[in-house]
Image: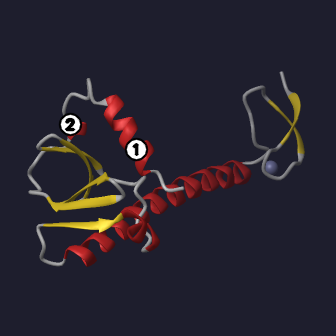
Amino acid sequence: MATRKNCPVCDNAFLGRKNRIYCTLACKSQANNERQEIKKRFENSVIATLVRNRAILLGVMSNRESFKVDKDYFEEEGYDLSYFTSLYRHRNELMMRCFEFGVSLSNGQLKIIRLKTEEPSIIEMHLEGVDKEFMDMLFSSRPK
Ligand SMILES: [Zn+2]
């Protein structure tokens, strides 16, 4: 049975079956394009943030294997600590991995190390027992 409804894209009233949402194929594909656009914009913004983080790391690390830097300075440079590619355990320390670098935070200082790329990330391992430490770390490193 046809029911009366309004198209969410153009707001035109139309008669259609219960499961029909859009008045025309054009409106249906416009809605789909907009969804794809939003999805792509979100993905691109995450990728852009990670790439910017990596560029900042490359800049400070140069040829160094490890480096310590003030967290506030790093954030002023545009580094976003809430974006990382995976988690990583280095010795007994939980680190945020950003591509080939590991970043950890203690006492307002970031410790950055260059990782061997073949080392597995903790995401690929068992997360049991890590959650509290993980949450503490994320919470303490979240930009204000
Ligand atoms: Zn429409």
Q: Check the image and tell me how it is coloured.
A: secondary structure
Quarter holding the C terminus? Answer: bottom right
Disc on the earlier residue, 1 or 2 = 2
Write the residue at 39% across / 36% down: 135
Mark number for residue 105? Answer: none
Place of residue 133 in the rendered image (x, y in percent of width and height, measured from the top left): 32, 34
Locate residue 64: give its quadrant: bottom left
- Position of 65 compared to 56: left or right? left
Measured Cα–Cα span from mark 1 to mark 2: 19 Å
- Residue 124 shows which numbered tag? 2
User: Which residue does the image show at 40% across and 56% down from the upper left?
Assistant: 81
Q: Which residue is mark 1?
A: 138
**Count of marks overlaid on the render:** 2
Q: Position of residue 78 (x, y in %)?
A: 44, 70
Q: Is residue 143 left or right of 50 when viewed as pictured?
A: right
At x 32%, y 73%, the residue is 56
Tell me the quadrant of the picture where the N terminus can be found.
top right
Describe residue 140's horizontal placement relative to residue 127 as left or right.
right
What percent of the width, then of the height, locates residue 109?
A: 31, 60
Respond yes or no on whether mark 1 lies under 8 Å from ligand 1: no
The answer to whether residue 137 is above or below residue 75 is above
Q: What's the amino acid at mark 1?
A: Leu
Give x and y (percent) for residue 84. Answer: 34, 53
Secondary structure state at the residue bearing disc 2: helix
Classify 100 as above or below 17: below
